[in-house]
Amino acid sequence: MINLYVSLLVAYLLGSIPFAVLITRYRTGLDLRALGDGNLGAKNVYLSVGHREGLVVGVLDIGKGAAAVLFSQALDVSLAGQLGVGLAVVMGHNWSIFLHFDGGQGMAATVGVFLALIPVVTLISIGLIAVTLWMTRNWDVACAIGLAWIPLASWLIFARAELAWYAVGMLPLILVRKIIVTAVREAQRHRIKGA
């Protein structure tokens, strides 16, 4: 049981590392919350700071999601515990202790969690995201299509109902966080313009 508690703590702290903020500050000296859409994720870094920096943030955010789950697997934590660890790393990313409980939307960290849990399904999902993004030039549509693949493939192809339901449960976390972040950032912009 101690392995589960250690894994959960490590996952939350690992998820809390704000790579987008750190890389943006290192490269530009600016606060990412004041750039682009204000989101603390790879997409905003990509659009506001640079393509290379955005890709690095994306890889690091995916990596921390995967690393948390792989760490729990190395400690022989049960599958149910690993699912909790996945949730903890995404919550750390979304509500970072290092940013006064601000953070990103959790998309890349969630992809990392699934990469560690079901790598083949997730690699196909990443491919779907890339192809859809290339075709539509719409990040949200590409991610919706790519991430929808995870529960469908988990259930229909690989007969992993527990992972399919977990994916169904994790995806609204991304959506709810996106809605909250968008509303807060928009309110901040209106307040600044009105001041």
Image (cartoon, rainbow, N blue to C red):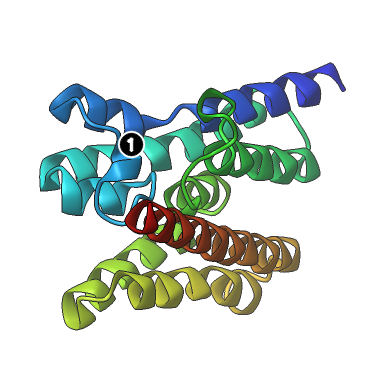
| Front residue (pair 188, 181) | 188
| Front residue (pair 28, 75) | 28
Spot occupied by residue 78 in the image (x, y as percentages of width and height): 78, 37
What residue sits right under mark 1 in the picture? 20
* Residue at 35%, 62% in the rendered image: 126
Q: Quadrant of the N terminus?
A: top right
Residue 58 in view here? no
Please tell me in which quadrant of the rendered image residue 132 appears.
bottom left
Sort mark 1 into few (<14), some (14-19) or many (20+) by Cα contacts within 10 Å. Answer: many
Q: Is residue 26 above or below residue 128?
A: above
Spot occupied by residue 26 in the image (x, y as percentages of width and height): 20, 22
Spot occupied by residue 47 in the image (x, y as percentages of width and height): 18, 54
Residue 114 in view here? yes
Tell whether 93 sits left or right of 23. right
SS at badge 1: helix
* Residue at 59%, 24% in the rendered image: 13
Tell whether 152 sits left or right of 58. right
Spot occupied by residue 29 in the image (x, y as percentages of width and height): 19, 25
Total labels drawn:
1
* Residue at 21%, 45% in the rendered image: 55
| Front residue (pair 178, 159) | 178
The amino acid beneath tag 1 is: Ala
Please tell me in which quadrant of the rendered image residue 143 appears.
bottom left
Q: Is residue 125 above or below residue 105?
A: below
